[in-house]
Image (cartoon, rainbow, N blue to C red):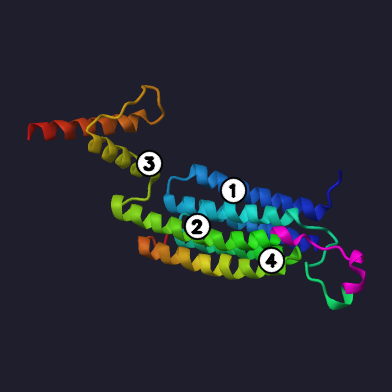
């Protein structure tokens, strides 16, 4: 199966954009940077969807009055993925606004946008609320940070007992 | 046709990499708008004019404005460095 060169370039762009977005989502620690990576991922997936309905000799999916008498002669791009992507773009902006609102709440609550610090603080808060030290296996990747959390929680509990 | 598509894809991927690696958040948001604009050009070339219009207006315009205003609200709006 030989693919036209133009489709190869477009597929490269769509898959490349998705991979960049996914890699950014996984590798960044900053929450705002993760939101930007999510925007990139959305754009890549939208391009991939439009590409699914793309035909090399196709025209825009509009039937002109002079084409009505021989509809079989014209090739048309598939309008269904286009309608889907039209909706997905608008919903994407809604998701961005929701993410931005959550990030603002995180900033107001914890004063930082760093994922690792937020997680440590979150585990501390949860453990202190339940008055337990968090169970952790010795070989877990986050055991160093969790060890600090355990220490702070046990200090807080003993402080509370003394009162 | 193939050259225009190649240039647009190249600009799009370069801007996407810039979004990930630029240390300045304002520059990263601007680069994400550039990605959306290049995507709108690609949609127009792929005979999807309605999607191209929406992407240029919502994706590049409204989304960039939203992210920039969020950046200002978060106190990350710094033009130097």
Q: Are marks 3 and 4 on the same chain?
A: no
Checking the image for residue A20, the label placed there is 1
- SS of the residue under disc 3: helix
The chain letter for the residue carrying disc 2 is A
Label count reads 4
Contact, CB < 8 Å: mark 3 with mark 2? no
**Which residue lies under the disc numbered 4?**
B41
Which residue position is annotated with label 2?
A95
Label 2 to label 1, Cα distance in Å? Answer: 19 Å
Residue A127 is left or right of residue B76, and the answer is left
Q: Which chain is mark 3 on?
A: A
Residue at the top extreme of this rendering:
A138
| Element carrying mark 4 | helix
A105 drawn magenta: no
Which residue in the rendered view is the most extreme toward the left? A163
Magenta range is A68-81
Residue shown at 67% from the left, 48% from the top? A15
- Locate residue A142: give its quadrant: top left
Q: CA distance from mark 2 to mark 4?
A: 23 Å
Same subunit, labels 4 and 1: the answer reads no
Nearer to us of marks 2 and 1 is: 2
Residue A69 colored magenta? Answer: yes
Q: Residue at x 46, y 61 (%)?
A: A97
- Which of discs 3 and 2 lies nearer the camera? The answer is 2
In this view, A8 is above or below B49: above
């Amino acid at each position: 199966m030989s693919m036209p060169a133009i489709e190869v370039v477009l597929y490269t762009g769509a898959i490349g954009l998705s991979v960049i977005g996914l890699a950014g989502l996984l590798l960044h620690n900053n929450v705002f940077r993760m939101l930007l990576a999510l925007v990139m991922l959305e754009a890549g997936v939208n391009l991939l969807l439009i590409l699914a309905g793309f035909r090399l000799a196709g025209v825009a999916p509009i039937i002109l009055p002079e084409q009505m008498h021989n509809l079989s002669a014209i090739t048309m791009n598939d309008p269904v993925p286009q309608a889907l992507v039209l909706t997905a773009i608008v919903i994407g902006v809604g998701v961005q606004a929701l993410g931005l609102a959550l990030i603002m709440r995180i900033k107001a609550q914890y004063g930082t946008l760093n994922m690792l610090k937020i997680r440590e603080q979150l585990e501390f808060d949860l453990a202190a609320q339940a008055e337990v030290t968090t169970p952790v296996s010795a070989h877990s990747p986050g055991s160093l940070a969790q060890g600090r959390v355990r220490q702070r929680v046990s200090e807080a509990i003993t402080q509370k007992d003394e009162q | 046709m193939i050259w225009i598509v190649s240039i647009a894809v190249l600009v799009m991927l370069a801007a996407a990499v810039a979004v990930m690696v630029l240390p300045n958040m304002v520059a990263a948001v601007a680069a994400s708008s550039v990605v959306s604009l290049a995507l709108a050009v690609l949609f127009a070339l792929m005979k999807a004019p309605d999607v191209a219009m929406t992407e240029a207006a919502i994706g590049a315009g409204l989304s960039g404005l939203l992210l920039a205003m969020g950046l200002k609200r978060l106190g990350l709006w710094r033009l130097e460095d």
